[in-house]
């Protein structure tokens, strides 16, 4: 029964029997508290904005902003205990293409718990720039740490595998003829030393395809 129907029922009950007026009044007060508890309120949250489903072979080259402000409406009991972690906002880039394009942020871009409505999102649009990437095999070089004294003792360095597949923008490959491992610091300077090292990329949009680790084997002078 809705609140208006309940109030109409209470008026009829009171008019039919004066002795029931006290009961009708008590029920009316209870109904008022029920309606007040269900009243809608507005609450604002700042949540991270995710870029989802970037098409294969493309990468985002601008920074569209990491957060959005979301205004929500709903029953006070629901909103009073809500945490930002229960809200997610994102842009689906499945149908995106190369170049500059704008996406509208509406209620479909925000996921909220049942019973809550999205009233406003700020900003209401987001601009994304996508560029095409390519993949190439790039040689790997080891960064040997430990100081000059250690490096002077090195006779030979072997890396397995000797190259890794890198995905990057075309212009980034011109600045990246080789990729380097994280610093490898031997704990001795005689015989042979071997360690697993992670390959690093310094370019903003370059990533290692597959396993980013290689084995570095250092042979020291006798």
Image (cartoon, rainbow, N blue to C red):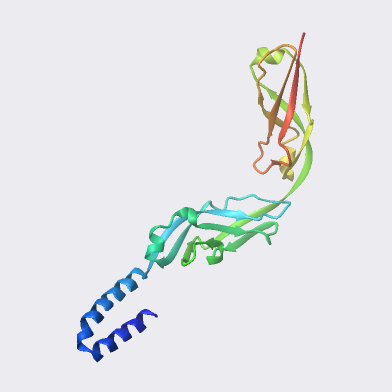
Q: Nearer the viewer, residue 101 or 121?
A: 121
Relative placement, left or right, of 116 versus 198 is: left
State which quadrant residue 159 falls in. Answer: top right
Seen in the picture, residue 100 relative to 12 is either above or below; the reply is above
Q: Position of residue 127 (x, y in %)?
A: 59, 58
Quarter the C terminus occupies: top right
In this rendering, the count of numbered labels is 0
Seen in the picture, residue 197 relative to 88 is either above or below; the reply is above
Quarter the N terminus occupies: bottom left
Q: Position of residue 63 (x, y in %)?
A: 58, 50
Relative placement, left or right, of 207 versus 77 is: right
Q: Nearer the viewer, residue 126 or 186?
A: 186
Q: Position of residue 46 (x, y in %)?
A: 46, 55
Q: Residue at x 24, y 76 (%)?
A: 26
Q: Position of residue 29 (x, y in %)?
A: 26, 75
Q: Residue at x 21, y 80 (%)?
A: 22
Q: Residue at x 42, y 66 (%)?
A: 73
State which quadrant residue 158 falls in. Answer: top right
Furthest residue to the bottom? Answer: 16
Q: Residue at x 20, y 88 (%)?
A: 18
Relative placement, left or right, of 164 versus 29 is: right
Seen in the picture, residue 178 relative to 36 is either above or below; the reply is above
């Amino acid at each position: 029964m809705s609140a208006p129907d309940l109030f109409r029922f209470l008026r009829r009950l009171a008019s039919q029997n004066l002795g029931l007026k006290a009961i009708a009044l008590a029920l009316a007060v209870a109904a008022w508290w029920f309606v007040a508890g269900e009243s809608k309120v507005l609450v604002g949250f700042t949540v991270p904005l995710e870029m989802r489903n970037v098409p294969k072979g493309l990468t985002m080259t601008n920074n569209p902003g990491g957060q959005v402000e979301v205004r929500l409406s709903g029953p006070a009991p629901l909103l009073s205990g809500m945490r930002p972690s229960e809200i997610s906002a994102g842009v689906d880039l499945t149908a995106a293409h190369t170049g500059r394009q704008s996406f509208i942020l509406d209620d479909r871009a925000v996921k909220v718990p049942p019973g809550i409505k999205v009233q406003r999102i700020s900003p209401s649009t987001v601009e994304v720039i996508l560029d095409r990437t390519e993949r190439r095999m790039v040689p790997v070089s080891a960064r040997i740490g430990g100081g000059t004294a250690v490096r002077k003792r090195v006779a030979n360095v072997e890396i397995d595998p000797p190259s890794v597949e890198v995905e990057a923008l075309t212009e980034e490959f011109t600045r990246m003829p080789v990729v380097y491992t994280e610093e490898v610091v031997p704990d001795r300077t005689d015989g042979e030393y071997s360690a697993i090292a992670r390959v690093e990329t310094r370019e903003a949009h370059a990533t290692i395809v597959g396993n980013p680790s290689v084995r570095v084997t250092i042979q020291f002078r006798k």
